[in-house]
Image: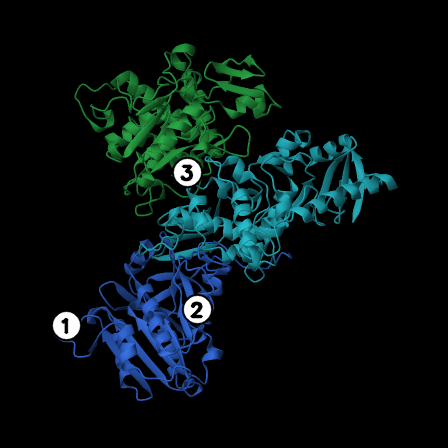
Chain colours: A blue, B green, C cyan
């Protein structure tokens, strides 16, 4: 194998300034980074490795759409060492980024199609990149009907509330919001995502593509519901979450069967998942 | 002869449903090597063996049955039985669930010593009998072949058992040979010891084979792998390796049963048992305490007395 | 291909002139101690020459109220590395394919690799734990870029495609016809043995289909989940990355192991490989199924037997694979 010595350091992050931090829920914040004069080269579905010097790296999906110029956004749930450290950062602090990594939502398969987006909790983050890509003024006419179903455990757990309002006001899409448990103020739908899906969404399953993301248990039951509705496995698209370090298919921990989730994923169709060991 | 008693015992235990499973030793394809096996059917009992190469401390496996209901028979040498005693004392397993098949142990053979002493020999050349060890019928001096950790053994008989395989031994290797693995190190100056251990620590790759073969390392999360907070760097530098081994040694103080399983597990041949053995020697001399031999008094490092000896603090 | 033979003395003299620059694997040192010089450096595991047990990827520091990151330029001087065929295959067939991927080449590995001149020593003393034939290797396996040496009638046979890298070849005398034939026959014997013994073509896919098999449970029972096998394996390339130092430090790369429970543990507490069974199966299938399915049938194992030799509980990957491969046959 030829040795490429012109190569750069694939592990070196670049530091970007945090422009704004948007609190979403009690443990989720969205970080908007200033790319200065650059535009992001990512495509919807990809992720980046975020680096906090002195603490470490964490793989986080990119939630902004590439159509949003000059910025990158990440919505981060505080779970481990690195995400906790990111939550402690302030505006104007610098955060290390390397990427983008991974495959993307299959854009060519999705154009000229009706799209059903189904998200649960923080799982909206990777879908939001694609949703805003599809809803962009210049791109919208490349896609047909768009339906979004978004659910969270409670009204307090809904993320991107500021964006949900914008989507709700659009008349070129159908937008459904649900929570597992409401509260005194909640006037919207109450119910688990798979149930709301079956009860409230009537689409011809052979004419639609479904893109889903959320906690593993939600994905499992949503796929089951979609199959019952008549969706075909190649038309159900989801993303896998694995522990990832290098993002380049080298460090080995995200290996499932002959795939590296960081490189060959994180986006897979249900048909692909059926042929993979269930080790995620 | 003892193997047949062992197998009969095992068969009976399974037949009578005295136990659900038996953890013991089995043979491998490779000369002078054995492996831990688990059996739960009578006809599997013929696979059980007992010879001086049965080096694993099988008490290690009890950890994996902590939350099950199995009744377990375990083959235990003297040192292994001490480990079981410590586990019982530390409330890690219930005695009612255990059936201890005691092995009166002549000591383990060190493979490297054996290959040095008899370079081309194969297993067929040896007879490991109760009356002694033989090479083509000629008796071998055990001192030449014994593991260093076994040469200093004080407990060749299990201290706790439900049935003993073989006759109890009347003398221990320590009484016989009056030798201790630590003697040559005790003669070194502090500087020489530092140099020696610094060199050994460059070899460590932090595979944790020592820790994982130890019957008494059962922490849910080992400090060495904790990231919040991080105590030791994952980089296997000599200083981080030192930190890992010294903290582990202190964690074992008053608990180590001197079986040497850690050292036999080391893939890069670090004489790593010497660290806990040294601590146990101090505890034996200064506190008159030996782990796994005394089910009543608390481990010295778990208690404080005003008149605790302190001569070893330098 | 240039070939020839030199006297043992000439070879040792050549090794001596380069000895300050010579890495020798423990296996070579053990098999052919006559090739060792006073200054040659012995390494336990061939991958240490390229894939370091720990490495600095870049530096960072806090200065003027902000974070800064600084690249580390990898550098290396040319070095010789003497290894057995199985160990050398770990580099050519596995590690290079991981770390020299075009467009994602790891610069540190590439720099060290660029400077490396491989000397492959024909294996004349296979150990009971070896099984290179099963995975497509053989005791005389070599690579055209390397210098191959083999003890041959009190002398040494040499062969390379890179005579300018290995000037010793110029001192060699040409082999006569019968000697050439002798080498060819030896080679052929070994290649035939490989053809006879190697795992069946469908083993990678067959093992993949046995993912759910009950047998993994039994196979994994005695494993202690330490990292001895993976850390001494010449092909295991999994690693971890972490930040070392608070206000000034470096991004650290260290060996990691699929045997460790924490390897796949999510921050949420979920673990896709929660028990011994999944972890042991991962080690076997990554080498014997996933890697070959990805890399044109090449196994991620070179059959050196090191993992068997050093396992504290004598866990035997060869036995495990053969047992599972037999099941493929029974099934169809």
The mark that comes first in sequence, 2 or 1, is: 1
Badges 1 and 3: C-beta atoms under 8 Å apart?
no
Residue A220 falls in which quadrant of the image? bottom left
Residue found at x 25% / y 69% = A24
Residue bearing the label numbered 1: A183
Which residue position holds label 3? Answer: B208
Q: Do labels 2 and 1 share a chain?
A: yes
Q: Position of residue C134 (x, y in %)?
A: 62, 46
Q: Position of residue B94 (x, y in %)?
A: 24, 34
Circle 2/circle 1 CB separation < 8 Å: no
Q: Mark 1 lies on which chain?
A: A
Q: Tell me if residue A110 comes above or below residue A34 in the rendering.
A: below
Crowd class of label 1 (few under 14; some 14 to 19; many from 20; radius 10 Å): few
Distance between the alpha carbons at the discs numbered 1 and 3: 51 Å
Q: Can residue A64 be seen in this view?
A: no
In the rendered image, residue A100, in percent from the top left (x then y), is placed at 45, 66
Residue C80 placement: quadrant: top right
């Amino acid at each position: 194998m030829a040795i490429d010595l012109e190569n750069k350091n694939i592990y070196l992050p670049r530091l970007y300034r945090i422009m704004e931090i948007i609190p979403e829920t009690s443990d989720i914040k969205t970080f908007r980074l200033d790319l200065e004069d650059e535009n992001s080269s990512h495509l919807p579905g990809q992720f980046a490795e975020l680096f906090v010097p002195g603490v470490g790296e964490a793989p986080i999906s990119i939630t902004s759409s590439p159509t949003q110029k000059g910025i990158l956004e990440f919505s981060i749930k505080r779970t481990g060492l690195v995400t906790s450290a990111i939550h402690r950062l302030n505006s104007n602090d610098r955060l290390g980024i390397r990427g983008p990594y991974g495959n993307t939502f299959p854009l060519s398969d999705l154009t000229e199609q009706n799209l059903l987006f189904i998200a649960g909790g923080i799982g909206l983050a990777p879908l939001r990149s694609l949703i805003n890509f599809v809803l962009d003024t210049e791109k919208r006419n490349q896609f047909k009907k768009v339906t979004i179903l978004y659910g969270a455990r409670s009204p307090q757990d809904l993320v991107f509330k500021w964006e949900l309002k914008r989507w709700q006001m659009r008349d070129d899409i159908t937008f459904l919001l649900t929570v597992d448990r409401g509260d005194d103020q909640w006037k919207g739908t109450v119910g688990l995502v798979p149930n709301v899906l079956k009860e409230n969404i009537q689409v011809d399953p052979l004419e639609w593509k479904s893109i889903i993301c959320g906690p593993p248990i939600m994905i499992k039951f949503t796929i089951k519901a979609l199959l019952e509705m008549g969706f075909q496995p190649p038309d159900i698209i989801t993303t896998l979450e694995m522990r990832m370090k290098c993002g380049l298919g080298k460090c080995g921990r995200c290996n499932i069967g002959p795939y590296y989730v960081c490189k060959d994923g994180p986006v897979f169709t249900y048909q692909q998942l059926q042929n993979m060991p269930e080790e995620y | 002869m003892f193997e047949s008693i062992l197998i009969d015992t095992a068969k009976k235990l399974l037949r009578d449903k005295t136990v659900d499973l038996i953890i013991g030793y089995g043979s491998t394809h490779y000369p002078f090597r054995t492996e831990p096996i688990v059996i739960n059917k009578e006809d599997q009992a013929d696979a059980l063996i007992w010879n001086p190469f049965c080096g694993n401390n099988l008490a290690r496996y009890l950890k994996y049955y902590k939350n099950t209901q199995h009744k377990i028979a375990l083959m235990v040498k003297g040192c292994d039985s001490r480990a079981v005693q410590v586990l019982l004392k530390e409330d890690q397993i219930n005695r009612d669930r255990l059936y201890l098949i005691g092995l009166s142990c002549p000591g383990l053979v060190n493979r490297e010593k054996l290959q040095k002493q008899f370079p081309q020999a194969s297993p067929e050349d040896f007879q490991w009998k109760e009356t002694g060890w033989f090479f083509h019928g000629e008796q071998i001096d055990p001192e030449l072949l014994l593991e260093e950790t076994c040469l200093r053994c004080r407990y060749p008989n299990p201290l706790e058992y439900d049935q003993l395989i073989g006759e109890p031994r009347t003398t221990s290797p320590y009484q016989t040979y009056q030798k201790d693995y630590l003697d040559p190190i005790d003669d070194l100056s502090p500087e020489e010891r530092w140099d020696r251990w610094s060199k050994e620590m460059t070899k460590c790759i932090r595979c944790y084979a020592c820790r994982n073969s130890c019957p008494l390392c059962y922490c849910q999360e080992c400090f060495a792998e904790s990231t919040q907070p991080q105590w030791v760097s994952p980089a296997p530098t000599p200083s981080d390796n030192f930190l890992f081994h010294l903290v582990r040694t202190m964690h074992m103080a008053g608990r180590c049963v001197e079986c040497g399983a850690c050292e036999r597990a080391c893939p890069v041949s670090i004489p790593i048992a010497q660290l806990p053995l040294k601590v146990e020697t101090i505890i034996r001399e200064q506190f008159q305490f030996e782990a796994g031999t005394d089910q009543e008094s608390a481990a010295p490092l778990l208690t404080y007395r005003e008149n605790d000896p302190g001569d070893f603090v330098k | 291909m240039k070939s020839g033979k030199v006297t043992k003395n000439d070879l040792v003299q050549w090794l001596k002139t380069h000895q300050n620059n010579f890495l020798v694997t423990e296996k070579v040192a053990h098999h052919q101690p006559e090739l060792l010089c006073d200054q040659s450096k012995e390494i336990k595991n061939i991958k240490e020459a390229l894939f370091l047990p720990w490495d600095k990827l870049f530096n960072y520091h806090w200065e003027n109220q902000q974070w800064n990151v600084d690249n580390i330029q990898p550098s290396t001087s040319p070095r010789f590395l003497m290894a057995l065929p199985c160990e050398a295959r770990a580099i050519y067939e596995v590690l290079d394919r991981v770390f020299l991927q075009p467009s994602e080449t790891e610069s540190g590995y590439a720099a060290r690799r660029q400077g490396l001149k491989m000397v492959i020593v024909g294996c004349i003393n296979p150990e009971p734990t070896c099984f290179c034939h099963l995975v497509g290797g053989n005791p005389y396996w070599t690579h055209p870029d390397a210098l191959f040496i083999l003890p041959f009638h009190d002398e040494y046979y040499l062969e390379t495609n890179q005579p300018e890298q290995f000037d010793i070849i110029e001192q060699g005398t040409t082999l006569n016809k019968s000697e050439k034939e002798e080498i060819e026959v030896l080679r052929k014997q070994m290649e035939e043995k490989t053809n006879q013994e190697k795992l069946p073509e469908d083993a990678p896919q067959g093992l993949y289909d046995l993912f759910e098999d009950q047998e993994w449970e039994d196979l994994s029972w005695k494993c202690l989940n330490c990292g001895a096998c993976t850390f001494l394996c010449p092909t295991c390339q999994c690693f971890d990355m972490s930040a070392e130092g608070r206000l000034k430090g470096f991004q650290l790369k260290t060996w990691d192991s699929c045997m460790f429970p924490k390897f796949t543990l999510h921050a949420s507490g979920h673990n896709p490989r929660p028990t011994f069974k999944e972890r042991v199966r991962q080690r076997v299938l990554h080498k014997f199924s996933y890697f070959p399915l990805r890399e044109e049938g090449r196994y991620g194992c070179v059959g050196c037997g090191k993992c068997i030799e050093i396992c504290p509980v004598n866990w035997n990957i060869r036995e495990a694979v053969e047992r599972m491969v037999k099941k493929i046959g029974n099934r169809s």
